[in-house]
C-alpha cells in the first residue's frame, strides 16, 4: 500500500507531541491499525511528528458519521463510543487509532465517535488537502 503523505512535511503551526511515551503510543497505534500498518517507517515517523494533543469534553463528538474528515486520531486517555446510525458498535480505549478511512480513501466518516469518559484526550494530526 502506498500512501502519499507529502502534506505532512509542511510547517504547521501546531505544538508537536514531544514526550517519548506519547510518541511510542502513537507509533504503536499506527502499527496496530489494519489500514495503516503497511506504511513505511519514514511515513509513520512523519505522522508521529505532526500529531498534537487535543482534549475533548465528555459526550462531545470527535467525528460524526457522514461528515468529511481530514484528521487521524489516537486515543491517549479515556474511553470512546463508536456508533453507526445511532446504534452503539463498540468502545475504544487507549492506544487505538481511528479516522484513517476518510484520509486513505477520501470518503466521508463511516461512523460517529464521541468521548465516553470525562478524561478523554486524543492525539490528532491534521491532514491538509
Image (cartoon, helix red, strand yellow):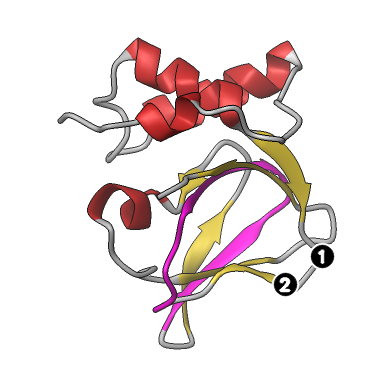
**Residue 22's spot in the image, x, y percent?**
69, 23
The residue that appears at 28% across and 24% down in the rendered structure is 39
When the figure is inspected, residue 70 is found, relative to residue 29, above or below; the finding is: below
* Magenta region: 66-84
Res. 28 visible in picture: no
Identify the mark at residue 25; answer none if there is no mark.
Answer: none
Q: In which quarter of the image is the N terminus?
A: top left
- The residue furthest left is 1
Q: Mark 2 points at which residue?
A: 60
The residue that appears at 77% across and 59% down in the rendered structure is 56
The residue that appears at 38% across and 12% down in the rendered structure is 42
**Residue 101's spot in the image, x, y percent?**
32, 54
Q: In which quarter of the image is residue 24?
A: top right
Q: What is the secondary structure assignment of the residue under circle 1?
A: loop
Res. 97 visible in picture: yes
Q: In which quarter of the image is residue 48?
A: top right
Instruction: Give the crowd class for mark 2: few <14, some 14-19, many >=20 residues within 10 Å.
Output: few
- The residue furthest front is 11
Q: Does the magenta stretch include residue 97?
A: no
Left or right of 104? Residue 125 is right
**Residue 60's spot in the image, x, y percent?**
72, 72
When the figure is inspected, residue 118 is found, relative to residue 44, above or below; the finding is: below
Q: Which of 62 and 84 is in front in this view?
A: 62
The residue that appears at 48% across and 24% down in the rendered structure is 9
Q: Name the residue under label 1.
A: 57
- Mark-to-mark CA distance, 2 and 1: 6 Å
Amino acid at each position: 500500500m502506498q500512501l502519499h503523505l507529502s502534506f505532512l512535511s509542511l510547517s504547521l503551526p501546531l505544538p508537536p507531541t514531544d514526550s517519548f511515551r506519547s510518541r511510542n503510543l502513537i507509533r504503536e497505534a499506527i502499527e496496530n491499525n489494519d489500514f495503516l500498518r503497511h506504511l513505511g517507517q519514514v511515513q509513520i515517523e512523519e505522522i508521529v511528528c505532526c500529531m498534537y494533543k487535543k482534549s475533548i469534553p465528555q459526550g462531545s463528538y470527535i467525528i460524526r458519521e457522514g461528515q468529511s474528515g481530514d484528521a487521524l486520531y489516537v486515543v491517549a486517555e479515556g474511553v470512546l463510543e463508536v456508533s453507526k446510525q445511532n446504534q452503539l458498535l463498540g468502545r475504544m480505549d487507549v492506544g487505538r487509532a481511528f479516522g484513517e478511512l476518510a484520509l486513505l480513501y477520501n470518503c466521508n466518516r463511516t461512523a460517529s465517535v464521541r468521548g465516553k469518559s470525562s478524561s478523554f484526550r486524543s492525539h490528532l494530526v491534521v491532514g491538509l488537502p
